[in-house]
Image (spheres, rainbow, N blue to C red):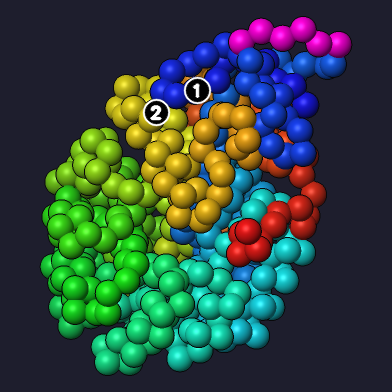
């Protein structure tokens, strides 16, 4: 395949030809004489995104999402690789369960995928299949809190195998009575619980520490001061407790105050966060009817890149900052050669037009759950998505096949 268009290369836009062979970028040239067919793209060619934090709900909750549907949604949003979390039913806490989930992903995913194992007694055996583990420092939807001494023992085992560990940081001892709206949910699981949990990481065995879904500049500062990696989500960047979402905005950690939201956005804009990930965690609409009983989590994998690209188009953030947090840093962490339009890199590309901003509508998205917290927001969706050197989405029509995705743990 040969593509002609304007590509984002080394921080600037260049008119060029991109040659693709065997799933890799074979050449990038400013001029080319060829008798081969050339795909001409309007707009801009960018690296495809990598979402480091999704919950595709399989096994156990496939009425909400599954690997095929979740990966198709990701593809429509310009994401061609994901890392899926382990709080399934049953939880991914053994070698056999991890092995079964890998088989599910290989059979159903249309994009590349990696898997987190749940930090547990079986971590050494599970480390044969994945380098990534998740720790929940407080109970949340579909998981269980781990005792401190037990966690220390398991982490020592884990770090002896050079694994990477992501932490959901909330201190349950600082929780208050559950609330009936978003502001009260914020009070129930306050920022102080997040800050204290990040502080507690210092007392754990030394090793890789990745702090998920930070909600404030205060929590980012503490994470950075301790040398931990930082992640932010689009819902904590674009939404606050003031959003008119009711139970549909219930997440853990909660949507914070407008001031906290603005502070984490400014930090992200300055390039101070290592990663941005969707924390795509869908639940059915009927589950979200009553606030007190509603499970926490929102869908987001399909709108992650489009929301950010719209912010770029409005001058709210530099494209280089988005590419670094959404592609380059994730690729480095996963050991993938992605994020640059350069010879020898994987041909994982999206084609977008910054003039094509549109309102996000749930009926146009591809989630099983049927809703989005970003209804009415502006987004810029890809016209074309190329993965492994082939069209995954062409002219906004899905072209991929079930099972074409590869397990990142095999790299």
- Which label belongs to residue 159? none
Which numbered mark, 2 or 1, is in the foreground of this view? 1
Q: Which of the 4 image quarters holds residue 138?
A: bottom left
Query: In the visual, does 89 lie left or right of 145?
Result: right
Location of residue 170 with respect to 237 vertically, above or below: below
- Which label belongs to residue 319? 2
Front in this rendered view, residue 193 or 227: 227
Q: Which residues are magenta?
A: 30-35
Residue receiving disc 1? 8
Location of residue 313 with respect to 192 vertically, above or below: above
Q: Which of the 4 image quarters holds residue 135?
A: bottom left
Query: In the visual, does 208 lie left or right of 281?
Result: left
Measuring from the top left, give residue 64's x and y in whole percent: 59, 65
Crowding at dot 2, Cα within 10 Å, few <14 / some 14-19 / many 20+, comes out as some
Measuring from the top left, give residue 246's x and y in whole percent: 34, 58
Front in this rendered view, residue 168 or 341: 341
Query: In the visual, does 186 lie left or right of 89?
Result: left
The residue shown at (72%, 71%) is 103
């Amino acid at each position: 395949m040969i593509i002609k268009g304007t590509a984002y290369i080394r921080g600037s836009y260049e008119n060029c030809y991109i040659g693709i062979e065997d799933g890799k970028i074979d050449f990038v040239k400013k001029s080319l004489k060829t008798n081969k067919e050339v795909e001409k793209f309007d707009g801009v060619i960018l690296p495809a995104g990598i979402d480091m934090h999704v919950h595709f709900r399989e096994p156990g909750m496939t009425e909400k999402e599954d690997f095929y549907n979740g990966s198709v949604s990701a593809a429509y949003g310009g994401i061609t690789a994901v890392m899926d979390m382990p709080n399934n039913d049953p939880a991914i806490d053994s070698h056999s369960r991890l092995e079964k989930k890998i088989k599910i992903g290989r059979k159903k995913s249309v994009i590349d995928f990696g898997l987190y194992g749940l930090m547990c007694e079986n971590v050494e055996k599970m480390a044969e299949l994945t380098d990534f583990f998740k720790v929940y420092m407080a109970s949340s939807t579909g998981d269980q809190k781990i005792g401190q001494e037990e966690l220390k023992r398991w982490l020592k085992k884990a770090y002896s195998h050079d694994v990477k560990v992501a932490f959901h940081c909330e201190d349950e001892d600082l929780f208050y009575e559950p609330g009936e709206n978003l502001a009260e949910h914020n009070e129930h699981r306050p920022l102080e619980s997040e800050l204290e949990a990040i502080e507690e990481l210092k007392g754990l065995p030394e090793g890789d520490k990745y702090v998920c879904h930070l909600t404030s500049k205060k929590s980012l500062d503490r994470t950075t001061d301790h040398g931990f990696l930082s992640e932010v989500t689009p819902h904590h960047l674009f939404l606050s407790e003031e959003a008119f979402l009711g139970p549909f905005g219930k997440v853990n950690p909660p949507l914070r105050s407008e001031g906290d939201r603005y502070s984490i956005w400014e930090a992200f804009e300055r390039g101070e966060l290592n990663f941005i990930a969707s924390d795509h965690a869908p639940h059915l609409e009927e589950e979200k009817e009553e606030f007190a009983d509603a499970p926490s989590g929102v869908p987001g994998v399909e709108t992650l890149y489009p929301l950010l690209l719209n912010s770029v188009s409005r001058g709210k953030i530099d494209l280089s900052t988005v590419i670094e947090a959404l592609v380059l840093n994730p690729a480095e962490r996963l050991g993938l050669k992605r994020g640059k339009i350069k010879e020898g890199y994987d041909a994982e590309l999206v084609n977008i037009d910054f003039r094509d901003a549109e309102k996000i509508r749930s009926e146009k998205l591809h989630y099983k759950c049927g809703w989005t917290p970003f209804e009415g927001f502006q987004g810029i969706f890809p016209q074309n998505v190329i993965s492994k050197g082939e069209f995954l989405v062409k002219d906004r029509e899905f072209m991929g096949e079930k099972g074409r995705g590869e397990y990142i743990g095999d790299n």
